[in-house]
Structures are given as C-alpha cells and as structure tokens.
Image: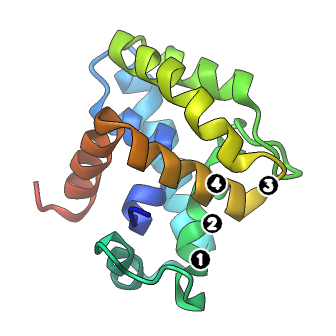
Amino acid sequence: MKSCTVLAVVGVVASLAVLAQADKKGELMPRYIKHTLDCVKELKIDTAVCKEMMKEGNDNSQAKYDPCKCVVACVAKKAKVMTDAGEADMEKFTAAVDEFEIKEWSAEWVRVKPICEPAIKGKKDCVLGYDFFTCGYKESEIFRDVIKKFMGAMDGSS
C-alpha cells in the first residue's frame, strides 16, 4: 500500500485547492487551507512523524501515525463532505470537486470513485478518511501529482 504524509493526508479537497486553476481558486483555497491548518493544530500533528508515512514500505500501522490518519476525516468534516457521525457524503464530495471547475479533476473523480468506494464501505471517521485517501493515492496519477505539489508548497520544497 502506498504511504502518505500528514501534508498529503490533509485532504483531497485541500490539496486540490492549492493547485486550482479555476476562477474559484481565490475563494476556495483559503477555506480549505484554514480547515487543514485547524486540523493539524487540533490533532497536535507532528509533521516529521507523519512525513515518515510517505516512505515506500513504511509500517503505517504504528500508533504514532494515528493522528496523521485522522487529518482527512477532520478536514472532510469541516468541509461538510463527511457527516459529524463520520460517514462519507459522496454527493457533497462530488460537488466539492466540481466546485473547482477543473474538468480533468472532475473526470478523474468520476473514474476513481467507483474503484475506491468499496474500500470505505462500512467504515467511519479516521479509518474511512485514511483508507479512501490511500486508495485515491494508489489509483490516480493526477491525485498523486496534486498531493506531491501540495506537500511541496506546504513545506517549501517546491
């Protein structure tokens, strides 16, 4: 299974916001970045620990990675694409992706959604968020590229 870091895990939608080319970039980016930063603070994330998760072959089952795995759920709840009960709201997630008005992202979401949806069936909160993110990272080159650029922008390496 491909690994991910906290900066990657901050959320599918947050990462898309940073790289948005649509007219809504100025409106959407600050909203998702704020959600992300709030979640990192609330979860007391140690980004150095979470960056270890990106290494191929890393054992991400270690307890020290648990806060990192919860960032996606936290951001998703703040963005209202996950219910307060920790369940995915796929209609709202689709609307959030489409809101950026980037055809390639919307088309990729349509392609990846049926592949990754079974990975989260019956799951909630952090497990749902982490498993869904991991599937998207594995299945989508577009998603991987966006995440890598987002991580670089967040830590200053790109």
Which x, y percent locates residue 11? Answer: 50, 49
Of the residues under marks 3 and 1, which one precedes in the sequence? 1
Quadrant of the rendered structure where residue 73 is?
bottom right
Residue beneath label 2, please?
70
Q: CA distance from mark 1 to mark 4?
A: 12 Å
Q: Amino acid at mark 2?
A: Cys
Which x, y percent locates residue 114? Answer: 61, 28
Quadrant holding the N terminus: bottom left
Discs 2/4, front: 4
Q: CA distance from mark 2 to mark 3?
A: 13 Å
Q: Is residue 11 visible?
A: no
Q: Amino acid at mark 4?
A: Gly
Mark 2 and mark 4 residues within 8 Å of each other at the beta carbon = yes
Residue beneath label 4, please?
129
Q: CA distance from mark 3 to mark 1?
A: 17 Å
- Left or right placement of residue 99 versus residue 53 in this view: right
Q: CA distance from mark 2 to mark 1?
A: 5 Å
Q: Nearer the viewer, residue 138 or 107?
A: 138
- Left or right placement of residue 89 versus residue 35 in this view: right
Discs 3/1, front: 3
Q: Amino acid at mark 3?
A: Lys
